[in-house]
Image: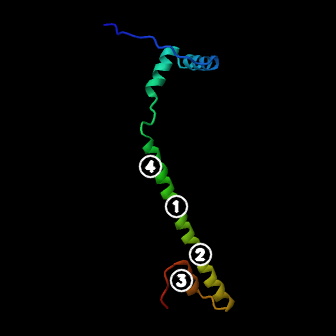
Amino acid sequence: MPSTTVQVPVLMSLTQKRRLARKAKQANLTMGELLRQGGERFSPIEDPAVLDHMANQVIRSTTKTILAIDKTLAMVADSERRMAKKSAKGRVTEWDLRSACGMPLRTL
């Protein structure tokens, strides 16, 4: 049973027409079939709120990451100050090094 088809005029520049004709030829399709398949695959985002939500998630996770990096850098700076202080006194021990690095301490 033949299906009814309708003609849909599509206005485009000559450059666009040439580019699409080239793509259709490479895909071994007619230009109409290329446009139909492309139109079927196209799916615009229907809800702008989705993009807003995604952007807010990125902002939240980035902020959390920056805070964690700042905390880590502060811990490293504090550790370096403690090590410099002990080093200036000439008393850096293995215990000091292990403690500063968070390594397990050996019992003597």
Q: How packed is label 2: few (under 14 Cα within 10 Å), some, or many (20 or more)? A: some
Q: Which residue is mark 1?
A: 63
Q: Residue at x 69, y 89 (%)?
A: 88
Q: Is residue 63 above or below residue 86?
A: above
Which numbered marker is on residue 99? 3
For mark 2, give the secondary structure: helix
Q: Residue at x 60, y 17 (%)?
A: 17
For mark 3, give the secondary structure: helix
Q: How packed is label 1: few (under 14 Cα within 10 Å), some, or many (20 or more)? A: few
Quadrant that contains the N terminus: top left
Amino acid type shown at disc 1 = Thr
Assess whether mark 1 and mark 4 are in contact (beta carbons under 8 angstroms): no
Q: How packed is label 3: few (under 14 Cα within 10 Å), some, or many (20 or more)? A: few
The residue furthest left is 1
Q: How is the image coloured?
A: rainbow
Residue 27 drawn at (x, y percent): 53, 20
Q: CA distance from mark 4 to mark 1?
A: 15 Å
